[in-house]
Amino acid sequence: MDNRMQVPTEVRDRIFSIANLLYEQSGRSEMPALDKVRELAGIDMVTASQVLKEWRKVLPASAAQLSGNTPDELSKIYNEMLTSVWECAKKIANQNLYAAQKAWEQERDELERLRLELSLAYDRQTQELIATQKQLSHQLGINTVNEAKLNQVLPKLHEFGTKAVSAQEKVSVLEETVQQLEHRLRNDPQESSFNPQQSADATITVEAVKLSDAASDELVSKIMKLS
């Protein structure tokens, strides 16, 4: 014969809730105390004891085991997984670091190459500029000397020009005189007024003037070369 009394469902559910709360608060390490359950539920000792026994029966058997330490096998698996993840992370990090280092080295080499090219170009242009300056300085010196020579020769050239004009005028007169004498000689060979020596002197004078003109032209040519 079952001597247990019938406990209302509302009371049973209240006791179960209190027992679960106390059990969770203890970290599932201690069973709820009967006095505490009775006090919180506001019931008599007999009812509290009967329902709490029922609660213990339906409590999962594994619940008590969860309060223990982590099993060694699980810890081993966890540590192995953690080590594997860490090694994988290190490998990826090292690969990224190596790639970044190679990229930096390539960029550094490229910058060094550009710096060297710019340095060589600068040196080359500097040397060309120095050579050009020397050439200009040399040519300026030559021009200065030629200008000084030209300034010395210009008065003489002017003098030669004046004499050449005067000589040309004399040549014209003498050529006219020679032509007249030749004409008179052809028309009247016996004319006593004809003086052969005078004709010869005129011819010689004409040739001398022409030679003087040639010398003047040669001097002008030399002056033009200097300038």
Image (cartoon, rainbow, N blue to C red):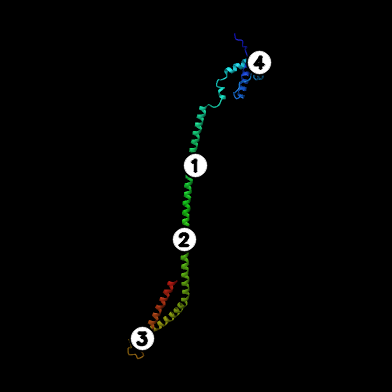
Please identify the quadrant where the N terminus is shown: top right
Q: Is 136 placed above or below 21 here?
A: below
- Mark 3: amino acid: Ala
71 or 20, which lies in front? 71
Label pair 4/3, CB-CB below 8 angstroms:
no
Secondary-structure class at tag 3: helix
First in sequence, mark 2 or 1: give its number: 1
Give residue 200's mark: 3
**CA gap, disc 4 to disc 3?**
180 Å
Q: Residues within 10 Å of mark 4 (few under 14, many from 20)?
A: few
**CA gap, disc 2 to disc 3?**
69 Å
- Mark 2: amino acid: Gln
182 or 211, which lies in front? 211
**CA gap, disc 4 to disc 1?**
71 Å
First in sequence, mark 4 or 3: give its number: 4
- Mark 1: amino acid: Leu
Task: Classify residue 31 by image quadrant.
Answer: top right
**CA gap, disc 2 to disc 1?**
45 Å
- Mark 4: amino acid: Met
Mark closer to the observer (2, 3):
2
Q: Residues within 10 Å of mark 1 (few under 14, many from 20)?
A: few
Secondary-structure class at tag 4: helix
Give residue 97's mark: 1
| Residue at image coords 48%, 47% | 105
In the picture of the structure, the residue carrying the numbered disc 2 is: 127
Q: Is 56 placed above or below 226 here?
A: above
